[in-house]
Image (cartoon, helix red, strand yellow):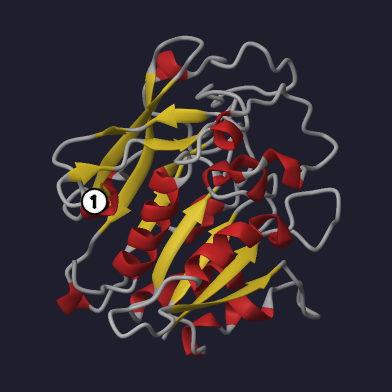
Amino acid sequence: MKRILFKTTIPRAEDDWHVGRFSLLAQQLESLRDDRGDQTFSVTARDRTTDADGDDPDLVNLPDSHFDELWLFAVDVGAGLTTADADGIRRFTARGGGLLFTRDHHDLGACLPKLGEIGHAHFFNSVNREPDLSRHRVDDTYASTISFPNYHSGRNGDLQVIEPAGPVHALLRCRGSDSITRFPAHPHEGVVGVPVATQTYARVIAKGRSRVSGRDFNSIVAFDPDPMDGEGRAVAHSSFHHFADYNWNPRSGCPSFVTDPEGDQVMVDANALDDIHAYVGNLARWLARDPD
């Protein structure tokens, strides 16, 4: 059984995006079985905690832990990782650990560039901006307090169409030759891209499209270093809302500061979550380097 650590970059706060708001994702992963019917993944979910030095013991000690994967939900506004935390994550991936790291709009999750080369897959407003200057503008014009990047892929509770970029990646395959095309939507997603230093082993595998401006934007970057080097795989996501309970089931609730109008597509379409369920299974297996 592969062991996955869910980790947020904020201490427990009931009226925020604490790790309990990703419980449906944990349940979905733990429901997966192998050909013999055995459970494939075990999930441990924890919010950020700190020791006397202000570091998170889970992350500092991650390289020597029993975990095979880290799913990092960067829900802070810039101070979610210390230097020691980031070093622990880098050493974890260097010894073969798999990493999902995701954030959201504007500067939400702006601690991620501390992760070094792969951390620069995430573009923010105040740090590591998108290289294309024409994109330094508000996309979701309905949210007056949220600046760029904030690509409007749809209402919370609705679905967006994910467009494969280049050849369909293993992460986006389902039902034989079909590809995954529907993800939970969000009114103001962040954006990702391939850092220059990783271009030999990373690529954009999926794009979203704004329902306000019509512009496409990079939604997922997959890093696949040579396994002979011992490095683990990693995936950067433009928005943690792809995985949140609220976006899989709006009735589960959200923090009080979320005031966007809700949609209902995930509630009225019996197959609405089939693609995201298939995707997270692919993701867990791919990060573990299970045979494709």
Placement of the C terminus among the 4 image quadrants: bottom left
- Quarter holding residue 203: top left
Q: Which residue is depicted at the point 54% across and 15% down? A: 139
In terms of depth relative to the viewer, which is nearer, 115 or 36? 36
Q: Is residue 246 above or below residue 13?
A: above
Q: Which residue is depicted at the point 60% across and 52% down? A: 111
- Quarter holding residue 285: bottom left
Q: Which residue is depicted at the point 53% across and 14% down? A: 137
Question: Element type at marker 1?
Answer: loop
In the visual, does 229 lie left or right of 85?
A: left
Task: For residue 183, say whether it is visible.
Answer: yes
Q: Position of residue 233 (x, y in %)?
A: 31, 65
In terms of depth relative to the viewer, which is nearer, 209 or 63? 209
Q: Which residue is mark 1?
A: 175
Identify which amino acid the numbered label 1 is placed on. Answer: Arg
Q: Is residue 104 above or below residue 136?
A: below
Q: Position of residue 263 (x, y in %)?
A: 63, 25
In the visual, does 38 lie left or right of 126?
A: left
Q: Is residue 142 above or below residue 45?
A: above
In terms of depth relative to the viewer, which is nearer, 43 or 175? 175
Q: Which residue is depicted at the point 41% across and 13% down? A: 134
Placement of the N terminus among the 4 image quadrants: bottom left
